[in-house]
Structures are given as C-alpha cells and as structure tokens.
Image (cartoon, rainbow, N blue to C red):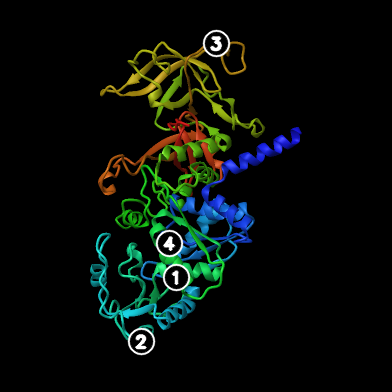
Amino acid sequence: MEVALVAEQKLMEEIKSKNFIEEIIDEELAEGKVSAIHTRFPPEPNGYLHIGHAKAICINFGLKETYHGKCNLRFDDTNPVKEDTEYMDTIQEDIKWLGFQWDELRYASDYFQKMYECAVMLIKDGKAYVDDLTADEIKDSRGDLHTPGKESPYRNRSMEENLDLFERMKNGEFENGARVLRAKIDMAANNINMRDPVIYRISHTSHPHTGDKWCIYPMYDFAHPIEDAIEGITHSCCSLEFEDHRPLYNWVVENTGFPKPLPRQIEFARLNLTHTVMSKRFLKRLVDEGIVWGWNDPRLSTLSGMRERGYPPEAIRDFCSRIGVAKAVSEVDIAMLEHCVRENLNENATRVMVVTKPIKLVIDNYPDGKEEDVFIDNNPQKPEEGKHVCKFGKELYIEADDFMLNPPPKYFRMQVGGIVRLKGAYIVECTGADVDADGNVTCVHAKFLEGTKSGEPNSNMKVKGTIHWVNANDCSDVTLNMFDYLILDGEGDFMDRLNPNSLEVLSSKAEKYLDSAPVGTRFQFMREGYFIKTKKTNTYNSIVPLKDSFKM
C-alpha cells in the first residue's frame, strides 16, 4: 500500500511539472495522433545566438530528451543577403556548448527545388500568382485591422501566364523587386497575414550554401512549414510572435500535397530579460558601431558572450528550466540568471585570494626574509578537493578599501589601533600608515600577534573583521575586466541607455597559484566575486559578484 502511494505521489509530481507543450504532446500520443516526437531548432544564420535562443534550444532539445525523440538543427538560410557561414559555425558551437546534440543537420536551402515545385503546384491549383506591384504598393493595398485589402490588378492572371512569369523569374530575366509570387488566399481576411502574402521574391545574390544556382528565394512563412513537413517534424515550437502566422503555416502545409499527420505549430512566450538587448539586429548594431568588442563581448546577451564571460552552460540550462514554458509574455529579472550562475559556481569554483585594488601592508615585527605556508581551502563545499599553499611574509598587499584613516562607526576592517585577522594567517594590529603630500595612503603598517596564526593556541581570539591579502614578494600581476550591465534601467531607445561604465579594467595582485591554472578555469576571488581565466595572458573576466540580489 505504501509503495503504491509513493508511486502515485511521483506520478502527480510529474504531471504537475509538465508544461503546456508537454500536455499537448501527451494528449496527442494518447490519442494516437503522433507515434514519435520530432522537433527542430531552426535559427536564421544572420547573427550570433543569444540567451533568448537558449530558451528555444532547451525547449526543442528538451522535448527530444523527454520523449526519446529526435531534434534537427536546421539553418533557415532563405535570405542570402544577411547570412554567413561564420554564423552557422558559431551556432553549432553554441548548441554543443549548452550540452545538446542534434540528430540531423539540415539547411532550408536543401529544399529549394521542392519549394519551387510546391509554388508551381499552387499556381496550377489557382492558389498563387505573379504580382508586378512594388513592395510599397503591396503594403498599401493590404488594408488594416478595420479595412479589408484591395486585390492586385494582377491577381487574376491566367495559370499559363503565371507559370511563364514564375519560370522567367527563376531564370533571372527580371531585376530585384520587379515581380513577386503571392499566395492567393483572401484579401478581406481578418488576419492580415492571410491577405495574399508574398511567398517568393527575386534576389540576385550568391547563396553561401547553393552559390548562384537560384536568384529567387522563398519567404520564411512559405519555406518554414514546407521544411517541417519534409523533415517529418511533429511539433514546430516557436516564439509567440509567430502566433498570428499560424493560419498561414497551416494553409501552406495543407495546400502543398504533404501527407498527414502534418506538423503542428505551437507558440510559447519569448524570453525578455532586463538589462539586455534581445535582438540580433540591435546586437549587430552594437558590434558594427564598435560599442562592444564583438559578438562575443562578455557584456552581451549572446551565448558566445556569456561563454566568454564565464557563465557555466549548466547554469543557463538551469535558468531556462526555472523560468518554465508559458504562453504569457513577461520580463525576467537578470538577477535570476545571475542567481543560477552563482549557485553553480559556489559549488564548483576554486577559492583564491586576489587583491583587486592593492595597497602595501608592512608587518614591522615580522622577521625579514621569513615566509610561512598558509593553506587555503580550494572549495569549502567540496572538502575532497583539498587545499593549496599561499606564502605569508613581511610585506603584503591588501585591498585599499580595507583600510581607513578615519573610519565610520562599526567599521571592522583595518584602522589604526584596530585588529583584524589576515585570512588563514595571523591576527594583526594596525599601528599606522604612510601618507603622501596629497593625503593619500601609500603604505599601512601593522604588527602581528604571536600565537594567533590559524591552528595556534591564540588563534581563537575574537576578531570582528577578516580580510584577504597576497604576498607582495610572491604574487602575480593580473588584469581584471570588471563588467557591469551594458543597458541601464529605463524606457526608450536602448542606445540612449548605454552604460558608459559597463567596463572597468583593474591592475591587481593575485596568488601565484593562478599562474598554473588552465584557460577557462573559474575561480571565486574571496570577498569579491567569480572570475574566469581568459586566453589573454594573466587576464580574468568577472562573471558575477558574490552578492545575490535575486529573491526566491
């Protein structure tokens, strides 16, 4: 009886955790409408993927994992003007970095011949026609939500004339924009997308995958459903902006001769994240205008940027899981993403001491030339990872902010006459400071208290402040890239909200221990935050600070 209750509880938890897409799939599987699940992730290779794409990747590849199905990676390369093989390469790298693997790599351009044949079929069935109107004329003739559109004067061309013109379009007889092929549906439809949409346009542009074979290219709304039908996609999951396009999606697959079951389009709310730009067009502008280093700038929302920043891919997948799959559009606080990153790094990052803004500390009563080993826990969360050695000596560096000549009340760091513990080492009493003509502190002086080193008899002396340090004669010079949000809070054009202080470069001092770490190693710099070692010599990118502002 108890076993049955446990099983029932597990089943109820599983049901409760399912999102609306999984509920739809479960129903279709139960009714026999589909027998196996096949999804796809279909990016247009006109830019780098961003965190919004990560949500779509996790949904589509997640369905593959949940239902033991398949998921294709398909490049929707129907617009050669904006596409590049660089983007294709990076997209593949990003997906693998997130921890997913596609079953088949496909290209929309693989199906150009089939799409052309489908277009010819529509012309023969009286469901498509060649239009000579310009793009602006077509736009003006579409009407609006309150006014029906006006039929093109070329709408009732004969099948023979349409076939001839479309063939000549394919053969390159006309200039860009001279003619288009439109679906013949309903110029009075309530859904404007159904008012004779353009399905083919002329573009004398070399294609990165097919070269100069074609000079006419299908529009996305025509190509995408055909691609899904050819590949046997069961569920075409896309963002909510395509909801109004679903009737056209269905019209295309229903009128181009594909057998049932036909693919089903399901829309989910796209990810909107504070302090970020979630648009490839805007991201490209930042890159093109030199506002950022490139597509992989750590301040960007691109997956390449987040990889360079040091975000663990597991944390991004965790974040996508936590925000869930919803129908309603909402904005997610970036603090939630940072919380997921911080949780992961707290478990996995090695602890080290790095003084970001150093000032010299001299322990006057410590013997000249003497050094002692201080043992630092690599990760308190994982004692099995052991400790590493840091050398303690007479001259150290501490954080400039850890000393004040005239401290406020309840200041528990270093001040003249006060005592603090040096992390892992001695308790010291501050005896004074050297000050230059401008009143700037150039050196702090202290004396260590005998027997107070960690593990010694007086080490339990109560001290309210503990600060970190590095040995001035046994440390490394490192450069820290300290990142803040690129976009400030507010409304209006994001270009007007660019943060002029989104990057601060610090010349800092670090334990020698960092020198031997491989590129890509993530650390917790004690009392400061999490950092990753970059390819640039002795340079580290800040990932997230220690302080967590996200409220569960």
Which of disc 3 and disc 2 is earlier in sequence? 2
Q: Are the residues tagged 4 and 3 within 8 Å (C-beta)?
A: no
Q: Which mark is residue 252?
A: 1
Residue type at numbered disc 1: Val
Label 3 sits on residue: 461
- Gap between marks 1 and 3, in whole Å? 78 Å
Q: Nearer the viewer, mark 4 or mark 3?
A: 4
Q: Residues within 10 Å of mark 1 (few under 14, many from 20)?
A: many
Is residue 125 in view from this perspective? Answer: yes
Q: Which mark is residue 548?
A: none
Q: Residues within 10 Å of mark 3 (few under 14, many from 20)?
A: few
Task: Say if 176 sits above or below 278 in the image.
Answer: below
| SS label for mark 4 | helix
Label 2 sits on residue: 168
Which of disc 3 and disc 4 is earlier in sequence? 4
Instruction: Indicate the quadrant where residue 213 lies.
Output: bottom left
- Gap between marks 4 and 3, in whole Å? 71 Å
Residue type at numbered disc 4: Arg
Which of disc 2 and disc 1 is earlier in sequence? 2
Q: Is residue 54 left or right of residue 138?
A: right
Image x and y of residue 292, in percent = 34, 51
Q: Nearer the viewer, mark 1 or mark 2?
A: 1
- Gap between marks 1 and 2, in whole Å? 23 Å
